[in-house]
Amino acid sequence: MRKIFRASALIAASVFIALSVQQAVLWASRVDLPTKIDPVHFYSAQQRQDLQDTFVEAIKGANHSIILVIFSMRNPEVICALNQKAKEGVDVRVVYDSGASSNLDRALSPKVKKIKRNPRGIAHQKILIIDSETVFAGSANMTTASLRYMGNLVTGFWSPDLAKWLKRRIDRMRAFNAITGGSRTFRINGQGLDFLIFPDPDEGPETIKNLIRSAKKKIRIAMFTWTREDFADEVIDAYHRGVDVEVVIDKQSGYGASRKIVQRMMEGGVPLYASRGEELLHFKMMIIDDEILVNGSANWTKSAFFRNDDCLFILRPLTDKQKKYLKTLWNIVISESYSEVKV
């Protein structure tokens, strides 16, 4: 296969420098956690936010309960914070993948309630629930690289309804039992939030395809691993009907697992980019018409919807503040990417 990506000649150095200065200020600012008054927050290392500090502060602030469902966790600060809260008497429960996080068998205190998941696929969700009222969900694992350097987006919600619904579903998790998917819609400060739990081979894929079909003006997708051709065909169709489409794929995945999708996109003429940093572009993010955000733990693979413990959520309509944040994030992602070679 011919060389797919070349350096983009369209990056404006002055814009990138301005963004870097602006985000450096954000990096140095204090951690802002979701509250009843300001219930939805975005977090990304690309916005010079330290996700390690965000999660540690959230954990330290817990008064009575912490539930963490995670694929990979090796960050010592997060592990230490969880152990400390368990020592203080907080009810701490961690559900983790048996292969990716086997280190937690010993790293977590005996006072932490542990469930080592061994599902049909992998236990791939990344969900943190604090005091049955605050939820963090997104694409970031609890590793130092994922929290501080990789391309990730985490969303924090202050929503007791969401927290309690997720807690009930997590309560059913055991080491080997198969879990079924499900979804529920919540209202958070005037915004709609659809939260989907996988495996769910029907509702999940149809939801993604219907969202792509609904796009009228713009689609932005940043994805770590993408192997589903049906999703690719919907994106190509949207592009051909005049929707402004941009897609960014992790460069390693673009030459590996996502290679067929990259070729398919290029043949369809879709503007395609690949990350050019050393760290993974780990997003699982889609933005529709600057009004709808899709985020979560699910890559666009069959396993994510059919076999894994995975999830995604849909937030709409986006507020002006959220639109500004995502626009800046997208500009940073594009500025740190290669554009494609036309075929």
Image: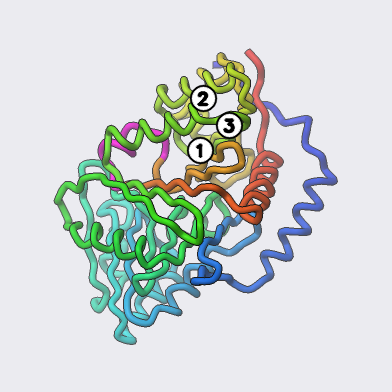
Quadrant in the picture for the N terminus: top right
Q: Is 101 positioned to the left or the right of 21 in the image?
A: left
- Amino acid beneath label 2: Val
* Three-letter code, disc 3: Val
- First in residue order: circle 2 vs circle 1: 1
- Between residue 31 and residue 323, name the one nearer to us: 323
- Residue 306 belongs to magenta span: yes
Labels 2, 3: front one: 2
Question: Mark 1 and mark 3 in contact (Cβ < 8 Å)?
Answer: yes
Asked whether the viewer can see residue 21, the reply is yes
Q: Which residue is mark 1?
A: 223
Q: Which residue is mark 3?
A: 247
Marks 2 and 3, the one that precedes in the sequence = 2
| Residue corresponding to mark 2 | 235
Q: Residue at x 53, y 63 (%)?
A: 51
Q: Is residue 98 left or right of residue 18?
A: left
Element under disc 1:
strand
Is the Cβ of the residue at disc 2 closer than 8 Å to that at disc 3?
yes
Residue farthest front in this picture: 190
Residue at figure coordinates x 81%, y 46% from the top left: 15
Question: Is 192 located above or below residue 130 in the figure?
Answer: above
Q: Position of residue 142 (x, y in %)?
A: 43, 60
- Are discs 2 and 1 less than 8 Å apart at CB? no
Quick one: label 3, few (<14), some, or many (20+) residues within 10 Å?
many
Dot 2: few (<14), some (14–19), or many (≥20) neighbours within 10 Å?
many
In the image, residue 11 above or below residue 159? above
| Mark-to-mark CA distance, 3 and 1 | 8 Å
Q: Tag 1: residue type?
A: Met
Of marks 2 and 1, the one in the foreground: 2
Magenta range is 299-309
Separation of disc 2 and disc 1 at Cα?
13 Å
